[in-house]
Amino acid sequence: MSALETPPLPPGTRIGGDVVEAVLGAGGFGTVYQTRGPKGDRSALKMVPLVNGETRAWREALIGARLHLRHPNLARVLEAGRWPAQDPRFIYLKQELVDGVRLDVWAREHDVDTSQVVDRVMEVARALAVAHEAQVVHRDVKEANILVRRSDGQAVLVDFGVGYYDGAPTLTEGLFPPGTPRYRSPEAWRFGRENKGVQGAHYRAGVGDDLYALGVVFYRLLTGRDPFLPGEHGNVDVEAVLNQAPMPPHLVNPRVPLAVEEVCLRLLAKTPEERYPGAVALCAALETLRARADASWKVPLSGRAELAGNRRARMTPRHAATWAGVGLGLGLVLGGAWLAAQWRTGREVATGSSPVTSPAVQPTPEASAGQEVAPPETPPESARAAAPPPVEPLPAAAASGKDTAPVKKKQKKTNDPQRDTQPSSAGTAARNVCLGLAGAALQACLSAQQQVPPVRQEPLPQECPAGAVKIMTEILGLHIGERTEVDWSKVRGRPVPVREDTPVRVGGHWVNAQGQIALPTNTRLSGRLFFGENRVYGRFTTAHTPSGETYRVCMELLDTSDNVGLALKPGSEPPGNVLVSPVAQVRVVDHFD
């Protein structure tokens, strides 16, 4: 029985501790409901009929367990189990609810520019970097599985229902795994041709397949069309995918910058080796592009049809005939030049669902009871090109609530790569390239030496800033001992370099016991890091929200096992190079021990 044939659960149905409010969507595999928890928090609940494949549902839950860290560009599986408890008929997956719209709808409804398109692609690349680090391949990257969140405009990669990880059992028969043919890589099609009729042959998708699919998404956002036109009967033109180069995006849409085109076409290369070696490398390439962005990036990618219509309305028949001839000649020249360049170089390609949160313990059955993208209105411009400068701890003065006056900074110059929004030198530009990356990739990108203070022992006891405890408990509604996840990088899995003044960011909305948002996602916590022989300790005394509010706080750094401080990662060489995990916690305290 298909999920579409299963009567929807009525509003008010209780599943675990959550109550069904509405249907969000349905497909052949399962139905997704919006639910509300006992504290008023909303979630997405995917209900999969057992007759549709219990193994597939549990595999999606296990993938969620592998991607258990909070990340702004991924949704997590929160919980999984059977329902009802007696005579179960469904597997349920409780997931983070992403309030957003599909990427293709966002592109169709907004007059987006190159800057916004590159930001969305980079955010998906960051999500893939996390998944690939966990040995998970998404296998169905497409606009329908990418949501643009309304609250901050970031892209969120969702629906790992057909994902795969090393060691997972094969759930489908045939040459190809589940997926969407128009996003299928050349190597997959080549495998299909070479193994047609071979019993037991099954293509195993890898990192290169996810990157190729993202390249198709990138191309469609830039041009409004697929890289290859449909073949016979509207099917994929496999011959073109295997042996032809896509029309360069700037010939389809002259508003596409050539440097952006180069990255897009590299993702569409015919072999995985010609593409980027991984999503982290793609992030670095896109950061490099953003550091070199100019005014052309702010020109909307759409408007061609309207402009042509206005011109046609002003043309006489004689003018129309004249311009038609000019257009034909120009098209032949441009097309001929492109084909000639391809012949000379011998290259085909230029080089250069449902939202999901994951349990801390992997769930087990025993343990748990394609449409075209129209030329893309400009949403609020992304502010993620560079982070604002960190703020030093406030002086010990009385505070009675939200601070509106600027916070006084120490008169000390730092080399923080996240401080520069307008690169003014080669070293600064190289540092900006690495924003958003993590670990070895970030460290490899950094071209200017970072300065780290000398090694110190564990810090001495210290009082909180004046008024901080009152602000946290009475204004923000937080309790002493309460904690939340923070991060230094949106690309996980590898250590990151830190300095004394490196701030952290709140990984998701910090909701207090009253169900109110105390500190929103991406709130920046500033203070001071102390470097011991084998551990880094952190004390954060100022919180800056994305909307510009400033609060005095008193929070200490913890690792994910609730130990104070973070262990130094291999490769650390204090004082010049200190590496730590990109993810940590902070805890509300009333004094620093």
Image: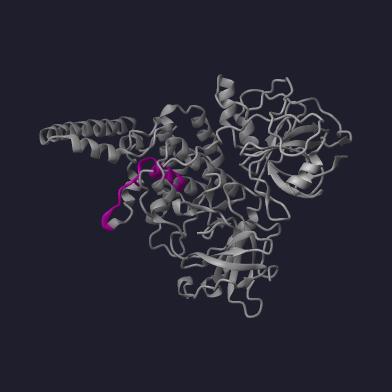
Whether residue 473 is visible here, answered yes or no, is yes
Q: Is residue 38 above or below residue 505?
A: below
Whether 426 is among the magenta residues is: no
Q: Is residue 180 above or below residue 440?
A: below
Left or right of 223 on screen, residue 277: right
Whether 225 is among the magenta residues is: yes
- Applied colour scheme: one colour
Q: Residue at x 42, y 34 (%)?
A: 262
Q: Give the x, y percent position of residue 446.
A: 62, 28
Most common secondary structure along the magenta stretch: helix
Whether residue 194 is visible here, answered yes or no, is no
Which residue is the extreme one toward the front? 400
Left or right of 473 on screen, residue 116: left
Magenta residues span: 213-233
Q: Give the x, y percent position of residue 191.
A: 42, 53
Q: Give the x, y percent position of residue 49.
A: 54, 73
Which residue is the extreme one toward the bottom? 87
Which residue is the extreme one toward the left? 318
Q: Nearer the viewer, residue 481 or 220?
A: 481
Quadrant of the drawing holding the C terminus: top right
Which quadrant holds residue 179? bottom left
